[in-house]
Image (cartoon, grey):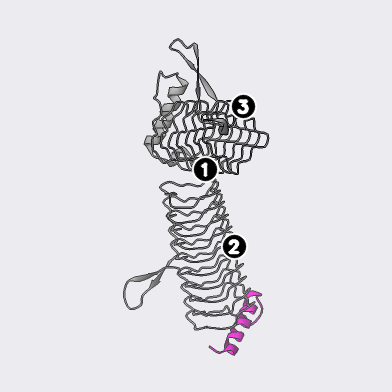
Amino acid sequence: MTPHELVAILDKHERWLSKRAGGVRANLAMIDLQGMHLAGSNLQSAKLSGANMSGCDMNKANLSYSDMFAAHLTKADMSGCNFYRADMRGAHMRGARLKGAILREADLRGGALLDGRSSGAQVLKSDLTGANFDDALLSRANLSGADMSEVSLSGADCQGAIMTGVNLSGANVKNANLSRADLKGVNLSGANLSGAVLRDCNLAGAILAGAVLKNADLLGAKLEGVDLSGADCTGANIARTAENFSLRIQRSLEGHYNWINSNGATGQRADLQSEDLAHIDLSGVNLSGANLKGIKLVGANVSEALLVMSDLSLADLRECNLSNATLDGTNFRGSDLSGARLDGAELGSVDIKGPTGKATGRMWPANLSEAKLIGASLRRTNLRGANLSGADLSFADLTDAILIDANLKDVNLEGARLDGAAMPAHSPDDED
């Protein structure tokens, strides 16, 4: 097709859109338009199915409601294009530029193309590999099953988008908004989701091996069957309810609740030794006396919880939020609390009672011996009488903490903040 012929078709299409005499809807289906200049063109509701538009300059063109089924758009410049409600099923957009494009409610699923040489149909996947969707609007778009590996979605708005089974491996999704999106079974291995908003999205069965989720917001996200162990979740806001875990763990937590509230008459003490409960939300829960030895609570929210006399020895509590929790008499021996938040927490001693319920006068202190608290926040934390022997508190924030009568033998306080902290009468240097 010559440029003159294309211009004539665009002119007639404009007339058709405005319902003027001589107007004809543009039908460019299966036409070779490679490298054509279509920037700023109005192709709303045009027929472009199967058209070859590879390398076209379509900057800020209007293609809303258009039929672009199985169109070839490889390396086309579609920056700022309007694809609102366009049918782009099975489209090939490998390496295309869609920065700032509007794809709201567009259909980018795979499509079936009838094969005239046989009675069958060929299923075409939407190939968006390496495309640039930075700052694009994809809210409520349907991208199910599309190949979006290595794409850039930095700052894109994908709220409510349907992206089940999408391949986003190696993608750049930094600061994108994916809240309420359906990402069930999505492949995000090696993807960068730093600062991304994934609130209330469905990530069930997603693959996150090697993914970067630094400072991402996953509050309310469904994470059934998701393994976060291989992802970098530093600073991420992730809260998984108990319903995200196995029935055995749910029953153990329920049984402990009954055990606590019936003074041991019903239920049983929770035994969650060595379980992986990373990023679980246990805020305000009473797990006093529970066996949590070796448990993994990385990034978990345990704020304002009751864990009196619980066994949390050898536990992995990195980045765990234990602020304002009651942890009197709790055993943290050898645990890793690096980067954990214990602001305002109570880590004092418990007055042991005898069989009759009377106080024996024997105090049972919280045990943090050999624990790692590197970079932990312990602002206003009550550590009166706690055993911190051999603990690593380097670069920890102990502003206004209470350490009166605490055992600080062989404690590493290099780089720690001690402004306003109430220290023991004798420093560790005074010990033999």
Magenta region, main secondary structure: helix
> Secondary structure under badge 3?
loop
- What residue is disc 3 on? 425
Is residue 6 positioned above or below 114 on the image?
A: below
Front in this rendered view, residue 420 or 117: 420
Front in this rendered view, residue 428 or 283: 428
- What residue is disc 1 on? 338
Disc with the residue nearer the chain's start (1 vs 3): 1
> Secondary structure under badge 1?
loop
Distance Cα–Cα, label 3 vs label 2: 62 Å
Residue 83 covered by magenta stretch:
no
Residue type, mark 2 in image: Leu
Circle 1 packing at 10 Å, graded few (<14), some (14-19), many (20+), is many
- What residue is disc 2 on? 137
**Image point 46% across, 43% down: which residue?**
278
Disc with the residue nearer the chain's start (2 vs 1): 2
Circle 3 packing at 10 Å, graded few (<14), some (14-19), many (20+), is few
Q: Nearer the viewer, mark 2 or mark 1?
A: 1
**Image point 40% across, 34% down: which residue?**
272
User: Magenta stretch?
Assistant: 1-24
Query: Is the residue under label 2 in contact with that under label 3 (CB below 8 Å)?
Result: no
